[in-house]
Amino acid sequence: MKTIGLLILVLSSFSSYSQIILNPSFEGPTGSNKTPSLWQKCGQESTPDTQPGHWGETKSASDQATYLQLVVRRDGTNEKVSQILAGKMEKDSSYYLFLDLAKATLEDPCKLRIWAGSGFCGTSQLLWESPVIEHNSWKTYLACFSADADYRSIMLESVHANGDLEMGKVSIDNMKGIFKGAKPPVITSLDTTLCE
């Protein structure tokens, strides 16, 4: 929780950067097959869940009351959500974002991918892929990327961990960003930094 508190303090000092992700804490009514407000499911597979309280998930949110959970299955199918951003990412510009990730309590580890596109569920550019999420408690990550075109949407999807075909679930919360700027703030207490 110290990391999250420090991030809130640092982010508040970067008020000139705009928050273009809508509902970055994935707030909404909890439930199996309930996507958080302002996010839309992608694909024909099952709908992502708004946690906690379903499928044996008792972990509290890292920010506010609820969080998103995405599954990847043994048959390779997975869950994805997308949204149209409040502003666009611009070609050849650098960005960074913060997010909290955790493994679902009763499932195997997996990864999270973040895509950019021009509309709902677009996959024009893979912006970031997490390491394997093996921890049940929340950890804060910093992701950095550059847009190779102008983009108006993002998509989040769960993927298997390094070819492992077991069933995995990743929990996502407190997604702060997308902030424009080549150099993110220096925060020594981050759990994982993945920047080029």
Image (cartoon, helix red, strand yellow):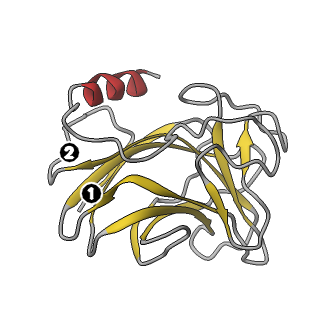
Q: Is residue 49 left or right of residue 140?
A: right
Q: Residues at badges 1 and 2 in contact (C-beta under 8 Å)?
A: yes
Q: Which residue: 72% across, 77% down?
A: 76
Q: With respect to residue 120, does 106 lie above or below?
A: above
Q: Is residue 194 left or right of residue 75?
A: left
Q: Is residue 148 left or right of residue 127?
A: left
- Which residue type does callout 2 highlight? Pro
Q: Which residue: 27% across, 75% down?
A: 149
Measuring from the top left, give residue 153's x and y in whole percent: 44, 63
- Which residue type does callout 1 highlight? Cys
Dot 1: element: loop
Crowd tier of the residue under label 1, counting other residues whose Cα lies within 10 Å: few below 14, some 14–19, many 20 or above: few
Front residue (pair 53, 195)? 53
- Say which of marks 1 and 2 sits in front: 2
Q: With respect to residue 26, does 155 lie above or below?
A: below
Q: Which residue: 42% across, 54% down?
A: 85
Q: Which residue: 70% across, 49% down?
A: 35
- Mark number displayed over residue 195: 1
Q: Which residue is mark 2?
A: 184
Query: What separation in Å lies between label 1 and label 2 (alpha carbons)?
Result: 9 Å
Measuring from the top left, give residue 144's x and y in whole percent: 29, 56
Picture quadrant where residue 70 is located: bottom right
Front residue (pair 12, 75)? 12
Crowd tier of the residue under label 2, counting other residues whose Cα lies within 10 Å: few below 14, some 14–19, many 20 or above: some
Q: Is residue 85 left or right of residue 73?
A: left
Total numbered badges shown on the rendered structure: 2
Front residue (pair 161, 67)? 67
Front residue (pair 72, 27)? 27
Query: Quick one: quadrant of the C terminus?
Result: bottom left
Q: Closer to the N terminus: mark 1 or mark 2?
A: 2
Q: Residue furthest left?
A: 182
